[in-house]
Amino acid sequence: MAVKRLDGITYKHKNWITQLDCLYECSAYLGVPMSREWLYGGTGFAFLINMEDQGQPGGFQSFNTEMIRNLANNLGITVEGVISLQTDSDFAEKQLAAWETAKRAIDNGYPCYGYSLGIPEYYIVDGYDDEGYLFQGIGTDEWEWQVSPAATRLLESGIANEEVRQLAKKLGVELSAKVTVGTNGGPFEIMDDYGNSITVAGKAHLRWDRLATTHIGLLEMFWVEPGLVSDDRVTVREALRFALEFSHSPRKWVFDRYKAGLEGYDNFIHTFLHTETDGFGLSINAEAWAECRSMAGPFLREAADRIGGAEAGFLRQSAELYDGIFEQLRSVRELYPFHGRKPEYMKNRSRIAQAVRHLEQAKELERKGLQSLERIADSLS
């Protein structure tokens, strides 16, 4: 069987925003260096929040992410791709187009990344064989997520044995008696009826005609090429303009039942106070949005160093605001961690009250932060 694989690209970091993980590693492979903070900020992601009104997971994926890839052009990389839904009339043609363009890109030395080759996250596609994609990402590494061949065979039958349960405990998760094992021919995602979830390593290979055939049914396959780097003022201004536009929840970017910006915090708070939930969605969103705000202050300080002049002071003042937002969201994340959370946390009124208080404080700081971003964007025009 013929195999073609790019040599030297790796997926080292396991952050919550896996699309940006993929972009970061693709950029490094192509010789386009940048800090992780510059990537989060330059694509606007560092300043976003997007929450559904019932606390569903994946608010950091459930929006039109086209502008993220467009803004990446300012950072020296060009991102092109094939997008489709399983329900589209031309879905089979799009599957074939994704397969052919990915092979062509890899033949030309350009890395790719796609959605849900394993679990519903983004994966780097670094090669192919006669049948399908070879990839890297969550659940494809060789460290503590790996289980024995015997446990793997049981997972393929939908059974999580004691070895898997002990692995879960090491990751801070006490699996309930009843579990569901999902796979897309690659990594295994084990979920229980408490809403706990862990990912266990599996074969990092997917037949090309199985792409986007899981319940989500979203096909995304992108390839990344080196491009031109924009002036820093342009990079910062366009990223902040997008973040400001996004904060008003336009249908162009934000889906039904989701809200961004200050209203996103309202949805977050409402879910804690008024919605019966196991906390799965709240915890994963807390992790993701805390991660984003952890990048905002460093991005603004890096922008101040790059741009200088009168705007540098505004950028550093804004960085302090976003550091404060991160501290509040980090506190929510610590109260409701994704790994190690317990079902009883969602019944604990004291814990809920603390989380709500931190979110309310984050919202008020965010109000000031958005005003500061508006002033910076105007000054860079």
Image (cartoon, rainbow, N blue to C red):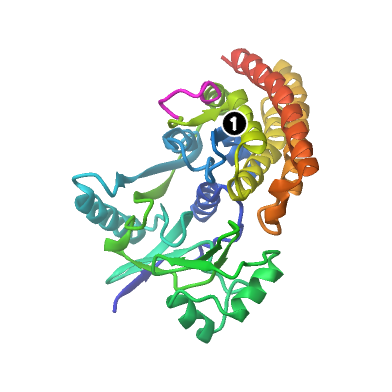
Q: Is residue 295 left or right of residue 78?
A: right
Q: Does the magenta run of residues contain 186?
A: no
Give the quarter of the image for residue 319: top right
Q: Is residue 87 left or right of residue 290?
A: left
Quadrant occupied by the N terminus: bottom left
Q: Is residue 323 among the parts visible in the rendering? A: no
Give the quarter of the image for residue 266: top right
Q: Which residues are magenta?
A: 245-253
Q: Position of residue 197 (x, y in %)?
A: 58, 61
Q: Position of residue 317 (x, y in %)?
A: 77, 23
Q: Is residue 177 among the parts visible in the rendering? A: yes
Neighbour tally class for label 1: few under 14, some 14-19, many 20 plus, Cα within 10 Å: many
Which type of secondary structure does the marked residue at label 1 adopt? Answer: helix
Q: Main secondary structure of the magenta part?
A: loop
Q: Give amino acid for label 1.
A: Asn
Write down the residue under mark 1.
Answer: 267
